[in-house]
Amino acid sequence: MRRVSAVVLFVCALSVVLAPGVARCDERKTRIEVLQVTDIEPYRRSLQGFLGELASSGFVAGRNLEVRRKVIGFDMERANLWSKIAVLMQIKSEAMRIADEKPDLVLTIGTPSTKFAKDKIIQAGIPLVFTAVAIPTAAGCTSLTHAGQGFTGATLYMDMKEALRLVKQAFPGLTTIGMVHSDDENGVAHVEEAKKTAPTMGMRVLSRQVDKNSPLTPVLEELRAEGVEAFAVPLDTYYGMRDYRACRELESFSLARKIPVFSFAMMKVPGAILYVGSDFQEVGALSGQLAAKIIRKEADPDTLPVARQEDLRVLVDPNMLEKLGWKLPQEILQIAQSVY
């Protein structure tokens, strides 16, 4: 028996000498559960940023890190009260499963999974980190900067006054903005924030709520008739559905009427000439930084403030500018990156 143990130890030692990048035989893997509702491209970028940051901190998936990802499917186009209740129950069911399995940490992506899973997971003594949440308080945080007992995370939240200041800089004569949103929790909160803040910048926001399977063009016509001079895309999953169909409608409307479109969502938005906002991948990386501190026992979640991207990203699309025959002020072009 001793001879067998000695052989095992010798093999382990030899493997470390010959392949330093391979985990030691006795190295314990850190287990992380990822929970999200729907699988959209911005969420994938958030996860990529999260895992990339963990790898930089020494936690590499497949080596010393085991990641299990659960995506709860949700047909947003056919969503009704009962399907929403079903998703809520599924989130809670997954939270119970995770609580029983006791991973080292849980990452929730988006507002619904964070809001409805956190209590059960935190009660089980499992630290939780969230990402891709637009308004922390809408996900159950006590404030914009402090999550609460047992959890923390990184938010897409942007200082709306600063965002609108940049918009005003890009469009000096703009007074009326149109925003169309669905019942997406992030979208609703984001539009309300814009409506509340716009008057401080000498502007107003006119908004409409649509069903997720509704066409966009009729609502754009209504808002245009009410004096809207530019349209803004909020952080709303409605715009990413059906291969960005709503964005494509917005692009056609914009080109036909020479009305500019800008986006507060850093995702592919056909038709937008300007983007102002937080980057999903960078915010995911911020969540990864928090997770690394928790895993290394350097801090408890309660002591880590909610992180957010310090400087908003500004992007311009030269192709759309050319198509619209629109020019942006030089001070915006100097701070913006190009989208091609």
Image (tube, rainbow, N blue to C red):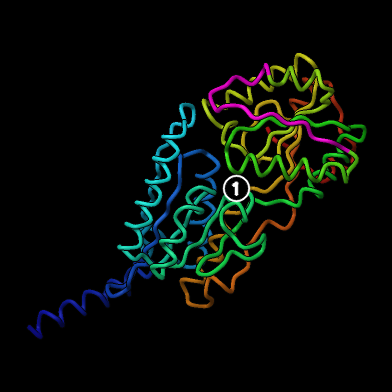
* Residue 43 x/y as whole percent: 52, 44
Residue 25 shown left or right of residue 323 in the figure: left
> Could you tell me which quadrant the N terminus lies in?
bottom left
- Look at the image and give the residue range highlighted in magenta: 203-218
- Residue 241 appears at what percent x and percent y? 53, 29
Give yes or no for residue 210 being in the magenta stretch: yes
Residue 334 in picture, x, y percent from top left: 85, 44
Instruction: Give the residue drawn at x 67%, y 16%.
Output: 218
Direction from residue 28 to residue 327 in the image, left or right: right
Say what secondary structure mark 1 lies in: helix
Judge by depth and name the residue closer to the eye, 114 or 320. 114
Vertical comparison of 215 with 230: above or below: above
Per the image, the residue denoted by label 1 is 280
- Residue placed at 75% from the left, 33% from the top? 262
Image spot of residue 320 (x, y percent): 75, 25
Along the horizontal axis of the image, is 198 left or right of 243? Answer: right
Question: Would you identify the image quadrant in which residue 252 lies?
Answer: top right
- In the image, taking residue 65 as reference, residue 245 lies left or right, namely right
